[in-house]
Every structure is written in C-alpha cells, then in structure tokens.
Image: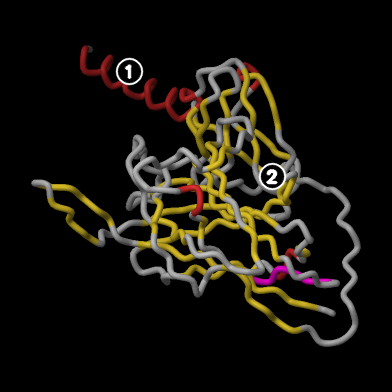
Amino acid sequence: MKIKLIFFSLLLFTSLSNAQEITILNTITKKIISYATILNIKEKRGFYTNEKGHFPLTILNSDSISISHIGYETLKLKVSEIKDSIFLKPNLEILDEIKIVAGESKEKTIGYIKKAKTLSWNINEKTELATLIKYKKKYKTAYIRKVYIPIGKMQLDYKNNKVLKSYPKFNSVFRLHIYSNSKGTPGIELLKKPLIIECNQNSEKIIEVDVSNEFIKLPGKGVFIAIEMIGELDNKRKLLNKKNRLILPSFKFTKRKKRNISSVTFTKTIYDNGKWKTTKNHNKLIKNFSEFNMAVSLTLGIYD
C-alpha cells in the first residue's frame, strides 16, 4: 500500500509539473515563438522562453507579466489569466513603400572591421550592447545589406597569480537588433523579424548577417547595431543558468576612430525598462573605457 501511495504521488507530481509548462505561440500561424522575453513587472526581473517557446509557470513571482518579441505586439497580462498557452499577435503595421532608384547599385562597407580590435567584452545573459554607426557622408538612398560582428573565443582564468588562456567549447545564442538613433540613444527597432544567431568555438571570427531583405535605409542620424545575449545552451539545447558568469563569445571593441564615422556605445539589461546606460563608468580598470566602441561594420547598397 505504501509503495502504491508513493507511486501515485510521483504521478501526481509529474502531472502537476507538466501542467506548469507554458508555451508562447503566434496567434495566426500557431507556431512556437522561440526566445521571447518575459518580464515580471513588479519585480523588474526578466528571463527568456527556450527554443521551443516554453517556460515554467513556477518561475513567475509577480502578479503581472509583459511578453515581448521582435515582430510581435507586446502583451501584458495577469498571471492568474495564464493557461497552457499564450498567443502573441504579429505586428501588422503597414510598411512604408520601398522606392529604389533605377539603375545599378554599388556596395560600400563602413565601420571598424579593418581597425585594430584591442579589447574583448564578455556580456552576461539578458544584457544588450548597442553601438552607433553614424556615417558623415550623405547618400541619397543607401540600404543596409550586411552586418559584421567580430567575436572572440578566448577565455582568461587566473591561477597562482598567473593569467591562463584557453579556448573552451561553447554554444551560445544571441539576438541582433538594429535601432534608430533617437536623440543620441537607441530608439525604435528597425528589424521586422527576429535574427537569432548561434555561435560556438567553430564559428567564424567575424559573423556576417545578411539583412538585405529588411530594406533598412541608413538615415543621416545613423543606426545602432545591438547584440542581446540570450545565453548559453547545454547539450540538450536548454538555456543554462550562468549566474553572472561570463559567456562566450566575447565581442571585439576598438578605440581607433574613423574620420567619417561617429560612434558611441550603450548597454542595458532586459529588465531595466529600456534604460540605456553609457559605458563611461562600466570598467574602471581600463582607462578611458568609454572611448572604446563595439567594432561592428555595415555593407551598404548605394543608389545615387
């Protein structure tokens, strides 16, 4: 009888545990939405759904939550209203008509891809870096075709007062953002769909992302190229809880200036209510740290 009771308890526990798994879905296609951002509104604490759009209900410690994802309307709801699934509405805003000047285009790459990259910055999960690329030369029509992100794979450890270099295996996932320039800080998202990038020890040293299908014009004010670190995946592709430990890859920074480009770098966490902070006081060990900027570059399609 005791064995049966234990067995029944285990079944009940398993059933309750499974019932607590919530899935985020597209309200039209019913497809899963991977790596959506969940914010506990009262506690200002956030996390992500996993690759399958799941998260455990037990992780919510707030009366209300906010769910957001590129290409979808942000949803706010009470925890008491949550059932097995939550549906997000695609953002169906009417896009501006795209008019491309007749004739062939020419390509030009701008940014810091050829500059010396003297600093690597590892960022924690749930953290964003955003660097402004403002090109001083004016083009009548220029679209962003590609984004280049230099990365580092080296890990530094300290043992017996010595610095040890290693190149461990890793598998991380991060999200690319392109923001407008709103009075010198990152503004609205210009991408219409999420660009999720997986990266490991075998990835290229410069990650190339094709965004030509987004038809994003390079405005005179420039754009912010941002990296949002979602986290590191285990062998079963589940997000690890790194507990503020550094995550690979690192992102390359440069102090070298370019005559025709203005840059500034900001950082924020996903639960900071969109409050971007400059890197001025971020690292006091490096002199004039705020003069360093993430060494991203852009390829433009120019129709003059």
Give how far across and how far down residue 222 sits, in percent.
72, 58
Q: Is residue 144 one of those drawn in magenta?
A: yes
**What is the number of the mark on residue 9?**
1
Give how far across and how far down residue 299 sits, in percent.
65, 73
Q: Main secondary structure of the magenta part?
A: strand
Q: In terms of secondary structure, where does tag 1 sit?
A: helix
Q: Which residue is mark 2?
A: 26
Based on the displayed image, in which of its 4 quarters is residue 67 positioned? Answer: top right
Q: Is residue 206 one of those drawn in magenta?
A: no
Give how far across and how far down residue 8 sits, in percent.
33, 19
Residue situated in front as seen by the camera: 134 or 195: 134
Task: Give the magenta part as a residue range.
Answer: 141-146
In the current view of this chain or complex, which residue is farthest to the left?
A: 160
Q: Is residue 57 left or right of residue 275?
A: left
Residue drawn at (52%, 71%), measured in percent from left and top?
Answer: 113
Residue situated in front as seen by the camera: 266 or 58: 266
- Mark 1 and mark 2 lie on one chain; the one further toward the N terminus is 1
Instruction: Name the colouring of the figure.
Output: secondary structure
| Disc 1 packing (10 Å; few <14; some 14–19; many ≥20) | few
In the picture shown, does residue 75 fall above or below 202? above
Q: Is residue 4 left or right of residue 48?
A: left
Q: Is residue 192 left or right of residue 55?
A: right
* Structural distance between the alpha carbons of marks 1 and 2: 35 Å
Residue situated in front as seen by the camera: 270 or 48: 270
